[in-house]
Amino acid sequence: MSGAAALVSVNVGMPRDVPWQGRTVYTGIYKTPIDGPVMARRLNLDGDGQGDLGGHGGEQRAVLVYQVESIDYWRRELGRDDIGHGHFGENLTVSGMPDDEVCIGDRYRIGEAEFEVTQPRVTCYRVGMRLGQPSMPSLLVAHHRPGFYMRVITEGEVRAGDEISRTRRGPHSLSVAEIDALLYLPDRSFARLHDAVDIPALSPGWQQSFHELLDGGGAPAVGVEPGWAGFRPLRVVALTPESSAILSVRLSAVDGSRLPVPAPGQYVTVRVDGAVRSYSLSSGSDDGTYRISVKRDGKVSTYLHTALRVGSVIETAAPRGDFVLSADSSPVLLISAGVGVTPVLAMLHQLAASGSSREVWWLHTDHAAPMAFDDEVRGLVSALADVRVHFFVGRRQTLDGLGALQLPVSASAYICGPQGFMDDVRAELVGLGLDPGRLHTEMFGARSAINPGLVSPEAVRAPHQPVGAAGGGPRVTFARSGLTVRSGDGSLLELAEACDVPTRWSCRTGVCHTCVTSVLSGDVAYSPEPLERPAAGEVLLCCARPTDDLVLDI
């Protein structure tokens, strides 16, 4: 360490409601230095709390640490003399523990307590809110001064003035600054990624992120899709009624070439008279064509049911989506309700076509009789060596039936249907002992929001045109929300929020990639430039602005 390390200040604060940009944030970012001893416990310091326990606090993030040297650095960098101890949300303000020397897995004795370093600071917008500097999450990463979390190994009292001594060095000597850059900055070292996942002290969330980077070849795990950019015309070559409410539409390339092979479970987005909708691919992919199966329940689906003819042309975006069948050998549960059968039916096609030896469970719920695709399903399961088929009528019978089936707890489950159905089935499977990490769900319509710390309004509004005069910029279509609006001067994230389109974000400055979204067509420019751009066909909503008409999968 850089000279003798010491605890300069102990800072605590309980979460409270704070007004922010016309909304309310429940946050514990405001910390106040206190005199005297403070007890460090497994989950927290006494007198301290966090507003968003999904991203802060808990055993792995019990204590946040920041350095007086970094506070002094930001005073100079930002030209500020009003930044003091606790202003970065830290519990412990320390000296002599720089981010480029402290390593993940290091242990330190402070006063009566012993701590272990588990991860860098989470890139969260609330530090920018606290300092009145919205770009702060990006600056902390770019300047390699994030600060870090520690867990409490031995509980005990700490107080300002305590000496800090290192009691153990973490494996691989991966500093806080280096491991922060491994996640958030480009040009990663594969060797160091492997070192990172070999550090037992590294928190599970960061372990998972690094495993995903390794699986994705070192790039952020953000949906690189096969196929084509934007929309292209596909020709209808067959129309097949599957039931009184479901129509299958077979699509092929206009020039007769083979369409790119999708992953089983993916979907395509179609554009009809300016409206866009997404439909799962519902068949195998061995003949170079695509099949979608559409339930008649709205304007676009009614058009497809009533106006399409063989030979019609539909504008279609390339297959995409991460609700896809894994390639491992674990048992697989294909669980669906109603027209939610379509993506898992594509998975069943893949299993049958490959002659899979996996243990397969086909579990479908419907109210109609005969059920859509009944003959097709029976033909496919006959090609499998180890398969079990169960049909249910209604959600209650499904949930009761799952508990009686003795499902393999090592299975991977793929669940598609109405949101309530998926939530209930997922909860039932977890209760039966299945690993939550192996339970996959697919939903259409708007995704659930991730807005850390925001206090939810009492009434959730449906997506709508923004209040006030329309913007003068390119048109932006939020495909899952069925809304097209004119953009203004702000970011795509700000435009979506003005329309009450559900969004996902955390840093709001182009660092964390929580807001990454698929682009179906169009292009964007970035301001500010993100620390690492997403993959082709993806956009970071928080810092992007459209340069032409844009269609987003949100």
Image: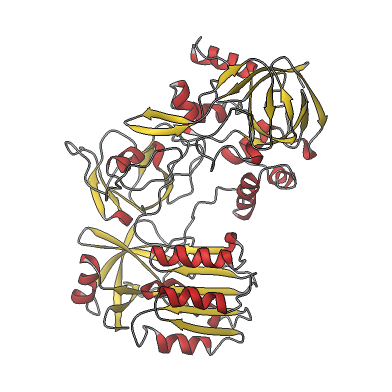
Foreground of the two, 181 or 428: 428
Give the color scheme: rainbow, by chain, secondary structure or one colour: secondary structure
Q: Position of residue 287 (x, y in %)?
A: 44, 79
Residue 437 falls in which quadrant of the image? bottom right
Say whether residue 44 is left or right of residue 315.
Answer: right
Is residue 248 placed above or below 101 in the rendered structure? below
Q: Residue at x 21, y 71 (%)?
A: 302
Q: Is residue 307 visible?
A: yes
Q: Residue at x 49, y 55 (%)?
A: 224
Say whether residue 249 is left or right of residue 337.
Answer: left
Q: Position of residue 467 (x, y in %)?
A: 20, 39
Residue 232 falls in which quadrant of the image? bottom left
Looking at the rendering, in which quadrant would you find the N terminus?
top right
Q: Position of residue 291 (x, y in %)?
A: 37, 75
Q: Is residue 284 visible?
A: no
Residue 122 falls in which quadrant of the image? top right
Q: Tell which residue pokes out farthest to the top in this image.
A: 81
